[in-house]
Amino acid sequence: MDQSEEFIQKFRAVMEDPHAYAKAWKARTNGKVIGWFCSYSPVEIIYAAGMLPVRVLGGNEPERLSDVYMFGKCCPFSRNCLAQGLTGKYDYLDGIVHARSCDAIEMAFHNWCRFLSTPFKYFILMPGHIDSPRALPLLKAEYRDFKDALGKLNNKAVSEEDLKRSVQEFNRNRALMKQMYGLMKADAPPLTGAEALEISLAGQVMDVKEHSDLLEQLLKVLPERKIGRDPGARLMLAGSVNDNVSFVKLVEDCGATCVIEENCCSTKYYWDEIASGRDVIEAIAQRYINRWPCPAFDWKVTGEKRGRWQRLWSCGPHSADLPTIKGLFESHNIPVLVLELDVTVPVGQFRTRIEAFLETFSLELV
Amino acid sequence: MTMKSEVKYPTRLFKNWQKAKEMTRQKYLDVATAKEQGKILVFGCAGTPYYWLAGFGDYVYWGGEPYGATVGSDRDFSAQCLRAAEGKGYGHDFCTYYLNCIGSMLLDKYYFTGGPFPKPDFIWSERFCPYGHPKSTQVMAEYLNIPHYIIDDELHHLRSGKLEQRENYVIGQLLDSIEWMEKILGKPYDLEKAIAGMMNSFEAELLWAEIILLNRTIPAPIGIRSLMGFMPAHMLYKGEPEAVAFLKELRDEMKERIADGIAAVPNERVRLVLSTPPPWGALSVISDLEKKGVVFLTNFAYAGGTWAKMEFHEDGSVTKARMPQELGWAPIKTREDLARTWFRWTKIQHKFPFGPDYIDDIDNALPIAVQFVKYLRADGVVMVSQLACLPQNLGTRDYKVAFEKANIPTTLVEYNMADPRDVDSAGLLSRLEAFVEIAAESKK
């Protein structure tokens, strides 16, 4: 195993059992672990409080538990996240936090609060109207309250210095993640898209410093890595939340490489950094207001939006953006295939559709 | 299934039925002719405080949900609209009310005239849910190339966080949006007219509450099909004196019917409450059940929220709410007073225990919901897993459990209120017939 393989394997091991990682972290540090639902949750504040922010992810396995609490209209990812809690997989959490985004994930959060015994439960009103000048004052106030609540939980106030250190650590991580995805621009990318997504997801459940340290080591050797496969078609995987690595593997097995992802498990999570030189809370709030938006917050009438490729069944906000995005790409002669994801992937059907899609590229080359 | 159809009570048509139909037709014709009439035409969510537009003079507000529901009641036209929207790529899992609107827009066909889809001056709307409203109106604003303003007015302050900062956020947007409209229209804002519009709306909300609460009478003087037929006179005319006058007449007629022992359903034997609006394109399910002695007293969705304001008392009674002056609220002198009064009235004073705003406080909401159903002397509740609208599913399971714990028979059905293709009428009827027998048995 070469060195890059060794580092990639470490990220993979975390994602194979993120709960074991969190429990080990807790035992090692005696710190608190806080679960979070949506990429609008200010993980920087949790980390500044000396706690481990851990994203609640779906299990990508069929389940019926959540049906009792959330009906079929709710998106499968949200239901699956709740199911993970109901099966006791997150029993080690000391707290759960949600920053308002869409109703489906919010329903998962409220059901979590009602039916699970996670001790600390916190809801942040992320302003939906991000283009309003009223958004920043609200979010600053919301974050200050959240910071105070975490300080109370820990019996230790969160200081400006704590916040600055945390912001630095997350900025470092985000810069490293961009550097990693930058390598995907190579003719022969040194990572598969599935590996890149695993590393990205690991960053949402690991101690950010540990993730950055490991990533930094990987990046030293990664440019030299040869993965010995024809990258095939270079695809952008865009749209709703996707934590399903096997879906990316399926796409790539058809003869492609997912060189970039545009969703809240990947670029939307790490892309935007926090500016320095201001009140830290304000800077964090500014980051979340200005970040690459989820369609649930994007109400501007611009006629232009960024890419989409796959969408989650029953994700209304993405559903509204899809025709514009598809049209935009197609107007630049970039072919688009729309796939509708559920908790599990219909392998046979998707493979046929993806292969047919990829064949259209070959025809163009002929 | 055999059901008794014995006539127990007299019935008669509502005197104002044709008037309500005419008011509805006229308002939708006004939408088509607003420009010719020199009126402002504004599109958006029907829950927006659109009566504030009175401050700019004559206006017509075109609510997306009532239009989407009306389209959804016409199987053929709705299918055309939905095909047009879905063909463009908007998902079948999107808000169906607005999918009907988007489809009608893409077809450039207005349901009420068959002519072109009217182009509003701008869209001014509330968020309500990220799934449907702001994203749909964004799509429409982009397509029609018109300005777009969404007020994010949800609070969720009961789980954690402070009300004051969330209130200021909402108030700030409301005030900003008035300035935004001033710039677009180039007109000064007449606060007095806006206040008058808002007070008319508040009064109409109390009258609507009174009308619904009168339905606790046995036999019920009005069934849901008629109630929903009268709803547009309230929903489309909010803030206008015509709505207040009409609802007073309707309330008085309800009292007359009660005095005369007039029933909506002459063989009334089972009284039910529906959680969401009925399937607009399959109202035959409701009328078939009415023939079998079932009266639907109301639905939760239109018994609260923006439409009706009630007070729930410790002795189990429910009454219409009181006007701000009866509550001793300070008079409105500024725009900020206007916004804060609306906020206090809508978001604090009179939250109805059903809907997205209550999801963070459902433990307090459930007993009030039970109280409402009991006060109406309902024999059961039909909860709907609503395929058209995610927020209407929030807490469904909790409500079902709460009603059952209170010995109120409850069932859960699934349909799409605005997509007739997505309603299994025969299956829905069979399921409800079976439930009616359970509810009837439990009365004994």
Image: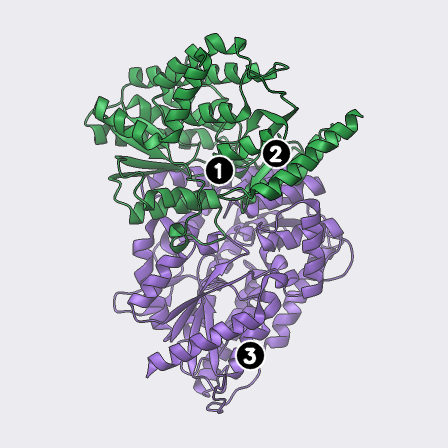
Frontmost of labels 1 and 2 is 2
Frontmost of labels 1 and 3 is 3
Judged left or right of residue B435, residue A156 is: left
Count of marks, rendered view: 3
Question: What residue lies at 64% left-to-right and 71% top-to-bottom?
Answer: B21
Name the disc covering residue A128, or none.
1
- The residue under label 2 is A308
Q: Quadrant of the C terminus of chain B?
A: bottom left
**Could you tell me which chain the residue with mark 3 belongs to?**
B
**At numbered mark 2, what does the secondary structure look like: helix, strand or loop?**
loop
- In front of the other: B388 or B161: B388
What distance separates the C-alpha of mark 1 from that of mark 3? Answer: 43 Å
What distance separates the C-alpha of mark 3 from that of mark 2? Answer: 46 Å
Question: What residue lies at 45% left-to-right and 36% top-to-bottom?
Answer: A127
- The residue under label 3 is B288
Asked whether the beta carbons under mark 1 and mark 3 sit within 8 Å of each other, the answer is: no
